[in-house]
């Protein structure tokens, strides 16, 4: 009985945790590795294990850093099943198709630049591979036990991070005659209490070992502050100057959260009479998936939903075609434009930024994490000149940052998750965080009295019963 970590350790992307019981293999997550191009291509097309040898995959949620390598696993011989919630399965059909399209487009441009006679590069998967993958998804409801292999059963519990997100609890029995039953918990990406739309994360308990994320393992989000009031302030200020407000936002999760807050402000009469645009085809599709899954909503959102569509209101427009998107630049009135990508690394947001950042009347509002060296981060740092599509632009627009809109637990929330357990796990494996965050969080866990805290290295394997490394 062992667990191996093959990505998403000491970094946030490429999560793949391999559980082996009696020679049967269950892969928790099959995330896409994101980083430098060459390394990403290699890591997303080659696995450190044989795809055909995997008996089942379980996905915590649809974000691509947890699911995006699945079509490549299928291409390498894996033939299912893949367990996840129904909402996750629906979001995956949007996200994986988009991911394949990006991979194909990338390779197309790379191949165009290859010297004549060179062997063309292949995308790590194509839209065809995605179509082969989607029928393997087997949706499971929250809170219902299902059998994964003969020895392992699982149950999905609310994670409160994005629509359909789950924590996974695995019960292992009969791995050999003398082995006691063993319970392994996996947080996936953990959300936070009181996020709009979603239910609060389930309080896990009674696990012998826990695989725990640590994205914000050493950071605290802004608290006790009325985010809505700050958002309203940014909108009003921009409108008073006659400017436009540009919000780069991830298509799944963040966009819906911002729309929900704006809708509340609208209903409370606190929003100036200006149009609001969501200009990201994927965000529009993801919003449709949100609408199809009210069973995932919390009580407040469900009650509101009985009266009206919570992700749509008069004043809010979902932009479709490229032409419509371009027309937004000709608008001469104040407006709000929400567009992807969240770190402003690609997508329609770039065109809106080009048109907005040189004018001091406008505002760019950053609502999520921006990795170092991304355009989002450069804007946050208020660099006087930024480069977009190879051209330089002077930054004169106001740049605001609202950090409290994150859908990830922070250090406080993560530690509360442990403190809330009547019997804390003997071993915690700290994963999914920049190395400094994971190591610092491991320190906090030791202070909390967890005796065996491991921050696995890439490829490291552990005996599940003892929590000891098999590589020493
Ligand atoms: Zn996530
Ligand atoms: Zn993640």
Image (tube, grey):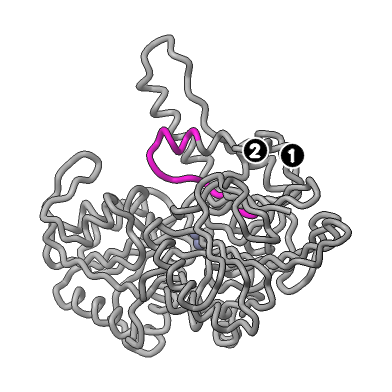
Q: Position of residue 405 (x, y in %)?
A: 38, 73
Highlighted range, magenta: 28-42
Q: Measured along the vertical axis of the image, is residue 443 above or below residue 372?
A: below
Q: Quadrant of the N terminus?
A: bottom right
Residue projecting furthest to the bottom: 268
Specify whether tag 1 is near ligand 2 (CB below 8 Å).
no
**Callout 2 secondary element:** loop
Identify whether 346 is placed above or below 211: above
Q: Secondary structure at mark 1?
A: helix
Q: Position of residue 12 (x, y in %)?
A: 45, 55
Instruction: Find disc 2 in the rendering and name its residue.
Output: 49
At label 2, counting other C-alpha atoms closer than 10 Å, the crowd grade (few under 14, some 14-19, many 20 or more) is few
Residue 258: mark:
none
Outermost residue, front side: 472
* Residue 284 visible in the snapshot: no
Q: Which mark is residue 53?
A: 1
Q: Residue at 33% x, 58% y: name it.
A: 370
Which residue shows up at 41% across the image and 33% down it? 38
């Amino acid at each position: 009985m062992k667990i191996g970590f093959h990505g998403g350790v000491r970094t946030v992307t490429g999560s793949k945790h391999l559980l082996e019981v009696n020679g049967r293999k269950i892969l928790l997550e099959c995330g896409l590795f994101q980083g430098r191009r060459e390394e990403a291509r290699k890591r997303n097309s080659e696995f450190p294990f044989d795809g055909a040898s995997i008996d089942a995959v379980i996905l915590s949620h649809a974000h691509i850093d947890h699911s995006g390598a699945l079509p490549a696993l299928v291409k390498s011989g894996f033939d299912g099943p893949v367990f996840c919630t129904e909402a996750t399965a629906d979001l995956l059909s949007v996200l994986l198709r988009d991911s394949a399209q990006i991979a194909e487009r990338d390779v197309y441009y790379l191949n165009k630049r290859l010297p004549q006679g060179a062997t063309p590069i292949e995308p790590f998967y194509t839209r065809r591979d995605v179509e082969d993958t989607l029928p393997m998804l087997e949706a499971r409801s929250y809170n219902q036990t299902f059998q994964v292999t003969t020895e392992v059963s699982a149950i999905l519990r609310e994670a409160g991070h994005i629509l359909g997100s789950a924590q996974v609890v695995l019960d292992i029995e009969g791995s050999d005659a003398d082995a006691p039953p063993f319970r392994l918990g996996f947080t996936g990406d953990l959300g936070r209490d009181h996020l709009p739309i979603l239910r609060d994360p389930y309080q896990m308990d009674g696990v012998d070992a826990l695989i725990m994320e640590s994205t914000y393992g050493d950071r605290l989000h802004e608290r006790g502050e009325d985010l809505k009031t700050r958002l309203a302030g940014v909108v009003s200020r921009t409108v008073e100057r006659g400017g436009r407000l540009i919000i780069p936002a991830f298509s799944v999760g963040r966009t819906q959260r911002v729309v929900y807050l704006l809708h509340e402000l609208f209903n409370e009469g606190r929003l100036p009479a200006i149009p609001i645009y969501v200009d990201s085809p994927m965000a529009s599709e993801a919003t449709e998936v949100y609408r199809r899954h009210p069973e995932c909503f919390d009580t407040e959102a469900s009650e509101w939903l009985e009266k009206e569509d919570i992700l749509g209101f008069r004043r809010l427009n979902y932009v479709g075609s490229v032409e419509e998107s371009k027309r937004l630049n000709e608008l001469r009135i104040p407006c709000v434009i929400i567009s992807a990508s969240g770190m402003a690394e690609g997508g329609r947001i770039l065109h809106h930024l080009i048109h907005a950042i040189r004018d001091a009347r406008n505002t760019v509002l950053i609502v999520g994490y921006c990795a170092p060296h991304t355009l989002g981060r450069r804007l946050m740092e208020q660099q006087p000149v930024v480069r977009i599509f190879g051209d330089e632009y002077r930054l004169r627009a106001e740049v605001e940052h609202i950090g409290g809109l994150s859908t990830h637990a922070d250090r406080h929330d993560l530690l509360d998750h442990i403190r809330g357990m009547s019997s804390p796990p003997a071993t915690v494996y700290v994963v999914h965080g920049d190395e400094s965050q994971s190591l610092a969080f491991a320190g906090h866990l030791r202070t909390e009295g967890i005796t065996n805290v491991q921050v696995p290295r890439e490829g490291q394997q552990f005996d599940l019963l003892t929590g000891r490394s098999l590589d020493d």
